[in-house]
Image (cartoon, grey):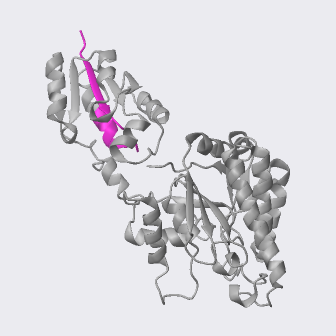
Amino acid sequence: MKHRVFVSGCYDMLHSGHVAFFKEASSYGELYVGIGSDATIMELKGRKTIYSEQERLYMVKAIRYVADACINTGHGMMDFVESVERFKPDRFVVNSDGSSPVKQQFCAERGIEYIVLERIPEQGLAARSTTDLRKTECLLPTRVDLAGTWIDQPYVSKYCPGWAITLSLEPTFPIVERCGLATSTRNMIKKIWPYELPDMEPEMLAKLCFCFENEPGRQSHVSGAQDSIGICMPGLVRHYYDNYFWPCRIETCNDPKVLDWLEQHLAMVMLAPRPDGCIVVKGNVFGAEAGGEGPALPKETLVSMVRALADAASDCWEAILAMDLEATAKAYNASFQAQIAMFPAMVTPLVRQALDKYAPHVLASKLFGAGGGGCMCLLVADAAAFCALHPESFRLKVRRSY
């Protein structure tokens, strides 16, 4: 009778080293694979997976050396116990760097032969490991600013304090420079941590990154704090600004239901990068203090305009938490209209053309970042259906809390 062989692992960022391992393990008998769940990987590695457990299960099952596979239902390093009971193997195979006395004892107690393999790449291919791959690909998050943009500049918030709302994103799409995705802040962070953020308290990490980017005396312009906060703090975050560069309050939402709901209703469309020479603060209503060329509008007018921005952001936050699509669309659109009323140069002819193109098919839309080009975030009834009809668009994956 043919031997039944069992292996177990995460198999996130599936690569040729995994396939070579499956091939060698299958030479010992019919191969069955236990796959670490999303929850187990979060527990063991302190990060979200690149691919969901169902995606990983699909890919592993598709490999010809694998007879069958399942998601392990346990937790920790021994999450595979129930999978072993299900497949009833008589051989348990591990890589040398995945071997442990606990696993060996587990097999001895059940009469399962324990086999340890060395990592040997397929002939002609480089050796691969997930750890090495993570050190060659930048997995730093990016962010989108959902509402209240520009309130993080004191020359705006001094007229009326208010919230900015950001959403941290997994980098599941190409990050294009000058497209409103906080790339300048992200590039500064890459100078310290080229591949991924360190495991530390997110708000403190955001403040460290903000201070590193805005070195005293290095430049006259101070980058808004919403960029570092949006990148470093997972989930949905709002931050309250009152005539100062760093917010005096920060609140977060990492409720999976709310974040899932946002993923179901947001789609992104890439435009061209903001062109060189495009000065989005030109012609703003705050005058020379904000880099504009003309005089500032009267104070009472500015107070009214900034209050409209602040009120829209507050309404947007409450609507999102309530998962009220109609109210979210109203507030989302109001926030964007308040932005462009203060900074009309955000909307170039290219941007206007794109806004007009998608207007009949979306509930609301806005530009990310300072505008002038870049990308648009569209609020839609069904993101999957919208992206199927508009192949140039794509869905977003929210970065969850560690």
Foreground residue among 92 and 18: 92
Up the image or down, 134 lies above or below 164; here it is: above
Taking the spot 28% from the left edge, 24% from the top edge, the residue there is 6
In the depicted view, which residue is nearer to us: 8 or 301? 301
Where residue 344 sits in the image (x, y, percent)? 80, 75
Relative to 249, is 220 above or below?
A: below
> Which region shows up in magenta?
1-22
Q: Is residue 73 visible?
A: yes
Q: Residue furthest top?
A: 1
Residue 11 visible, this angle:
no
Where is residue 102? Give x, y as percent. Answer: 17, 31
Image vertical order of residue 306 relative to residue 235, above or below: below
Quick check: 64 left or right of 390?
Answer: left
Q: Position of residue 94 (x, y in %)?
A: 22, 33
| Residue 11 is one of the magenta-drawn residues | yes
Q: Nearer the viewer, residue 209 or 392?
A: 209
Q: Is residue 389 magenta?
A: no
**Horizontal relation, residue 141 to residue 329: left or right:** left
Find residue 15 and report its image quarter. top left
Q: State which quadrant residue 194 falls in.
A: bottom left
Say which residue appears at 36% left-offset and 41% top-offset. 43
Count the marks: how many? 0
Does 129 appear above or below 246? above
